[in-house]
Structures are given as C-alpha cells and as structure tokens.
Image (tube, helix red, strand yellow):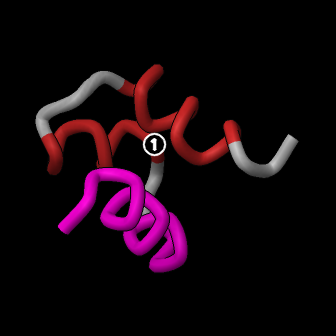
Amino acid sequence: MELKAKVIELRSQRWSFPAIARHLDISVGIVWHIVNRDTV
C-alpha cells in the first residue's frame, strides 16, 4: 500500500502522529507533512 494511503487510513482510525511514525518506521515530521500537505 502506498505510504500516503496508509498514513491517511491510520489517521482516520484516530492513531496519533507518533504512533503512526513508529508503526511505519518513519519520522513524525513525515507523517505530519503527508497529512497536512493536502489539507492546506
């Protein structure tokens, strides 16, 4: 699954940014950027 889609799926399940970052082994900043890039 594409990283962006996975992040959005986990956010929709109320996962926190740090939890998503740990789960996907990426930085919190990357998670934040993926989520907020398309909502601004």
Q: Residue at x 53, y 76 (%)?
A: 12
Quick one: 2 or 12, which is closer to the camera? 2
- Residue 4 magenta-highlighted: yes
Residue 27: quadrant of the picture? top left
Identity, as a three-letter code, of the amino acid under mark 1: Phe
| Residue, far front | 2
Quick one: 24 or 16, which is closer to the camera? 24
Instruction: Name the spot of residue 2 as percent of width and height, x first.
Output: 26, 60
Label 1 crowd bin: few (<14), some (14–19), many (20+), radius 10 Å = some
Quick one: 16 or 2, which is closer to the camera? 2
Residue, disc 1: 17
Judged from the image, the secondary structure of the residue bearing numbered disc 1 is helix
Magenta-drawn segment: 1-14
Instruction: Name the spot of residue 37 as percent of width and height, x first.
Output: 68, 37
Q: Is residue 17 left or right of residue 27?
A: right
Q: Is residue 36 left or right of residue 24?
A: right
15 vs 19: above or below: below
